């Protein structure tokens, strides 16, 4: 492990203590639909940034299956809960903007660990 890596990981772990995530799972066509990342960047992210406690966003996509996930991060569980109504609107608007897309599930988690380099 490089010098200082232990202290870096500790700082990173401390930063996420109490952080929560909402995982929005979408299923759409494998071809011809709108780009989930583009919808997230142009529509969801600007609105989410206005919500108190918003801490970031990640979009995952499997183009072969048409499945995508929008994961939003929240500083606290309270911020996650307080954003539910706005998140439901954004989720619905996103699915509509992407075309023939279904919201498959919405799941909520506490972030247990994060490490990025």
Image: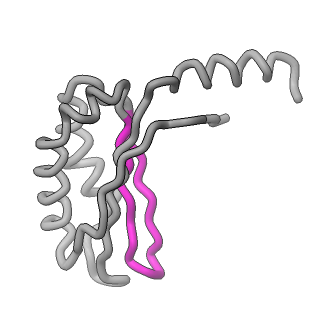
What residue sits 23% from the left and 74% below the top?
101
Does residue 59 show up magenta in the picture? yes
Say above or below: 26 vs 53.
below
Q: Quadrant of residue 31?
A: bottom left
Of helix, strand and loop, which mostly describes the magenta segment? Answer: strand
> Residue 110: horizontal and vertical position, in percent?
45, 37
Say above or below: 107 vs 11.
below
What residue sits 56% from the left and 36% below the top?
112
Does residue 116 show up magenta in the picture? no
Instruction: Please indicate whether residue 20 sits to the left or right of residue 91 in the image.
Output: right
Q: Quadrant of the N terminus?
A: top right
Say above or below: 41 vs 12.
below
What residue sits 27% from the left and 26% below the top?
78
- Region rendered in magenta: 56-73
Viewer-proximal residue among 84 and 98: 84
Viewer-proximal residue among 76 and 102: 76
> Residue 83: horizontal and vertical position, in percent?
19, 36
Q: Quadrant of residue 67?
A: bottom left
Viewer-proximal residue among 84 and 43: 84
> Residue 80: horizontal and vertical position, in percent?
28, 34
Coloration of the structure image: one colour
> Residue 2: horizontal and vertical position, in percent?
87, 25
What residue sits 17% from the left and 38% below the top?
47
Q: Quadrant of the C terminus?
A: top right
Instruction: Please indicate whether residue 117 sits to the left or right of residue 14 in the image.
Output: right
């Amino acid at each position: 492990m490089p010098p200082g890596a232990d202290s870096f990981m500790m700082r990173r772990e401390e930063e996420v203590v109490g952080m929560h995530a909402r995982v929005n799972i979408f299923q759409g066509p494998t071809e011809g639909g709108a780009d989930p990342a583009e919808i997230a960047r142009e529509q969801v992210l600007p609105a989410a940034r206005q919500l108190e406690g918003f801490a970031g966003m990640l979009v995952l996509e499997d183009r072969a299956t048409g499945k995508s996930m929008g994961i939003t991060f929240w500083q606290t569980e309270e911020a996650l809960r307080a954003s539910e109504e706005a998140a439901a609107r954004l989720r619905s608007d996103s699915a509509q903007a992407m075309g023939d897309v279904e919201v498959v599930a919405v799941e909520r988690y506490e972030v247990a660990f994060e490490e990025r380099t």
